[in-house]
Image (cartoon, grey):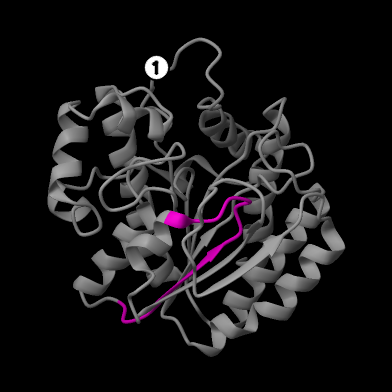
Amino acid sequence: MRVYYSDHYTVPLPEGHKFPMEKYRMVRERLIADKVLLDEELFEPELPGREIITLAHTPEYYNRFAEGTLGGAAIRKIGLPWSKELFHRSLASVGGAIGSALEALEHGIGGNLAGGTHHASSSHGEGFCVFNDFAVVILHLIKRGMIHRAAIIDLDVHQGNGNSAILGANPDVFIFSIHGLGNYPLVKVPSTVDIELPDGTGDAEYLSLLKENLPVIFEWKPDIVLYQAGVDPLKDDSLGRLALSHTGLMERDRIVLAECKDRGIPVSLALGGGYSKPIDHSVEAYVNTYKTAKDIFK
């Protein structure tokens, strides 16, 4: 299994910043320590050029972010202070998503130990998301003629408003989202299918809704599934407000990945959100996603 990582792009954040940047390194180290992945399965992504990023984003936004000339309000909307390191890190995250999708098309599954940046829209970033990796990947693969139709399965606790803003009108893209009704973003952009959950939803209700609604995606017959496997539905998550257990999250992943495997549909994994305190609980859940993937795609 080929998995891409970019945690070597160190991004300076102010002391006490709420975004847990260290989780990416911790996930990679834990995957190796637990022998879920081997060293030779990890790859550094290529940094995509401007012409690839601007398939999904406006040239003005790309240029201003690259040059560090976005205004203060635009930076606050992203929620991360601008730096050249953040620019390179954001490119690497998209590069990992591209590499993961290409691996999935060739071998059935690929992974990116970053990404799932589903809040970024064409002309701005928000919610810790600079460039929208899924939107770039889908438009890039379609332009190259490698796919005709793509599905996004977005199970992050926060609705992917950026995915829908960029891709929602595209008839060749199916966007499926299960997320918290009262959680961020306040204004949600409709997906193809949105399932909105009240605070405190636990394993049984969540998994029942997933099983009931998942078949519609596969009936649409996508050429690839991009799976946003955020672990912030976890009960311990500081920004989640749902109540899934580690066992429930693993069953969620098993349902999605087994369905892709059984139907012969390539699936590309993105890490997505995870904000537990301590962050070790999110790290454990991310590692469990890869344990599940390895078990299914033996």
Camera-side residue: 175 or 146? Answer: 175
Number of numbered discs on residues: 1
Q: Residue 146 appears in which quarter of the rendering?
A: bottom left
| Magenta-drawn stretch contains 244 | no
Residue farthest right in this picture: 204
Q: Residue at x 65, y 47 (%)?
A: 231
Residue 222, image x, y percentages? 44, 81
Residue 93, image x, y percentages? 37, 43
Please state if 30 lies on the left or on the right of 54 as rendered.
Answer: right
| Magenta-drawn stretch contains 154 | yes
Secondary structure at badge 1 equals: loop
Residue farthest top in this picture: 15
Q: Amino acid at mark 1?
A: Pro
Residue farthest bottom in this picture: 219
Q: Pointer 1: what residue?
A: 12
Please state if 148 lies on the left or on the right of 187 as rendered.
Answer: left
Which segment is the magenta one? Answer: 147-161
- The answer to whether 57 is drawn above or below residue 278 in the figure is below
Q: Residue at x 71, y 26 (%)?
A: 277
Quadrant (top left/top right/bottom left/bottom right) for the C terminus:
bottom right
Chief secondary structure of the magenta portion? loop
- The answer to whether 56 is drawn above or below residue 107 in the figure is above
Q: Residue at x 39, y 36 (%)?
A: 6
Q: Residue at x 50, y 27 (%)?
A: 21
Camera-side residue: 120 or 117? Answer: 120
Camera-side residue: 39 or 95? Answer: 95
Q: Residues within 10 Å of mark 1 (few under 14, many from 20)?
A: some
